[in-house]
Amino acid sequence: MGDVCDGKPRVSVVMPFYNAGATIARAIQSVLSQTYSNFELLLVDNNSTDNSTAIAHDFAGKDQRIVLLHEPRQGVTYAANTGNNAARAEYIARMDADDVSLPKRLYKQLLYLDEHPGLGVVSCYVEHVGHHKGTAGIEKYVNWVNSLDTPEKISLNRFVEMPVINPTVMFRRVLLQQHGGYIHGDFPEDYEMWLRWMGKGVKFAKVPEMLFQWYDSDIRLTRTDERYSTDAFYRTKAEHLAAWLMKNDHPYLWVWGAGRKTRKRVEYLMEKGIFVEGYIDVKPRFLDDACCIYYEEFNWDAPAFILSYVGNHGAREKIRNYLLSKGKVEGEDFLMMA
């Protein structure tokens, strides 16, 4: 894998933590148990008040590859950026303090990036480890993420949901210098960074192997933080989607889906200068002044860019297949949204 003997690691594992006393030892041990050993592990304490810091300090005293850092500004974005800025390796692997990297994760992802110089970010298949309640939605999401197993699928589906799970990625450190790191704000910062990088042409891929265990819990940020609310996701998507539409000369479009929620979310796009010519739906109706056409009556031979906002997974696939049957090309004639 082209390891060099200059004293520098080839991978920097960045693990922010806050009050993770119940799980951090498991997470650290999963990194120390990797089959690939030329790494540094940067543990970034984000003002923990439990025994997390003591556990991290104990591990650091036993393994010189571990560096313990502190970020006084509260927030995982600040802590992650602190780790990224301190990283010495050419590759950075993200890790959360309540998850587990399986033994070959670093080796497989490092090898993949070495063998694919055109790629910037690599993830992997994820095993969802649920907890006692409310896991069906997360399980469905993980299955969907695992189905995005090529750079093309990841790129085309990036406006549906977050197409990679943040703590599973390894990326080239140079991308931070070129496109910036996490931005703190009232939005999902990891999703925003991935969309920003993809908008700059960075290619994402997945190692087609199960290399990560993603632990669910009542206190995971994706469940509790307002930055991961549905509205926050839509605002973030709209900003980057509008930029993509303008860049690809699609300022005018038709929207598949005509419900009130869809129209509300489309407003975010319209605020960015995107014009909606009308709506396509499974039944004809009129919504205010916007034309709504029954899908079987739509002129599919006319040039039109379609944006599907139908979020139901089964319906989304039916719409995609219907558009493909009409000779439409995903990414050129239509995109799926959710």
Image (cartoon, rainbow, N blue to C red):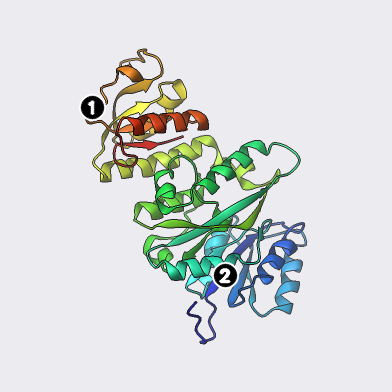
Residue identified by numbered label 1:
301
Marker disc for residue 267? none
Q: Which quadrant of the view contains residue 253?
A: top left
**Chain-order first, disc 1 or disc 2:** 2
Marker disc for residue 107? 2
Say which amino acid is labelled 1: Asp
Q: Which residue lies furthest to the bottom in this view?
A: 6
Instruction: Give the vertical position of 210 relative to 229 (above or below).
Output: below
Of 149 and 165, nearer the camera is: 149
Distance between the Cα atoms at labels 1 and 2? 49 Å
Q: Residue at x 53, y 81 (%)?
A: 8
| Left or right side of 215 for 170 | left
- Residue 123 can be seen in this image: yes
Q: Which quadrant of the view contains residue 302?
A: top left
Of 277 and 335, nearer the camera is: 335
Q: Is mark 1 on a helix, strand or loop?
A: loop
Q: Which residue is drawn at 29% across and 36% down?
A: 333
Say which amino acid is labelled 2: Tyr
